[in-house]
Image (cartoon, rainbow, N blue to C red):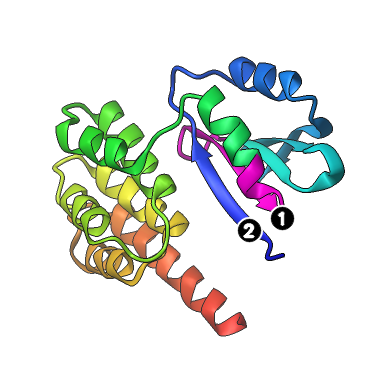
Amino acid sequence: MTRSFTRLVLKPEFSEHDFKLVVWDLFWDVVDLGRKEDGAVVDSWLTPGGEAEVHYVDDRNIGVRYVTIRGDGAADAEAELRPRCRVWALDEALAALHRAADRNDKLIALYATALTADDPEDRSVVEALADAARDDDPAVRQAVVLATGYLPWPGLVAVVEELSRTDPVEHVRHNARVLLEGMARTEGDS
C-alpha cells in the first residue's frame, strides 16, 4: 500500500484543547508533546496499529494551526478527524480571501488557501495569491512569499520572482529573494 499525506487546516475558533479532546476520544497513542521545530510547536500521535502518524502543528511563523497525517492509514485517520474538527475547505478559504477587508482576515485566509491547496496546480489559487501580491499592505505581500514556501507551484514561484524584482518594500524583495535562493538550493540537492 502506498504511503500518503494529508493536511487539515484548523479554523481559528477550533482550539488546541478542542483538537486534543478529539484525539483523546479516539484513543490515539501520544508520541510527543510540545516539540519545537522551525518556529512551530508540534504534538504527535499514532493511530491504533501505527497505521498513521498525526501531527498537530501550531505554526507560529504564520499564525496558523494545522494537522498533518502520514502513513498507510492516513485516509482512515482523516476520515476520523475531519467530521470532528472545524477545518477549512479550499473553496471556503478562497472565498474568505476574496472578501477579506482587513490585514488579519487577509492573512488567515491567504494561509488557509495555501495550506489547503493540493497538487496539481490550481489556477484559482494562483490568481488569488497573485491578487494578494498586489495588495497595498506589505504584510500581505510578504505573506504571499511565505505561503509560496508551503506551496511552491511554478505559477506562485513566478509571482514571488516578480515581488523579488519589483516590490516597493525592501524587506519583501529581500525575503522573496531568500525564498527563491533556498528553493534553488533545494532543487540542486535533489
> Is residue 38 visible to the viewer in this orientation of the structure?
no
The residue shown at (63%, 58%) is: 4
Residue type, numbered disc 1: Asp
Q: Which mark is residue 72?
A: 1
Q: Which mark is residue 4?
A: 2
Q: Which residues are magenta?
A: 58-76
In terms of secondary structure, where does tag 1 sit?
Answer: loop
The residue shown at (59%, 31%) is: 81
Q: Is residue 35 above or below residue 38?
A: above
Graded by Cα atoms within 10 Å as few (under 14), some (14 to 19) or many (20 or more), the crowding at tag 2 reads few
The residue shown at (14%, 42%) is: 136
Q: From the viewer's perspective, is 168 left or right of 143? A: left
Q: From the viewer's perspective, is 11 left or right of 134? A: right
The quadrant in which the N terminus is found is: bottom right
The quadrant in which the C terminus is found is: bottom right
Residue type, numbered disc 2: Ser
The residue shown at (25%, 64%) is: 159
Expressed as whole percent of the image width and height from the top left, the position of residue 167 reads 20, 58
The question of residue 169 being in magenta is answered with: no
Expressed as whole percent of the image width and height from the top left, the position of residue 66 reads 54, 36
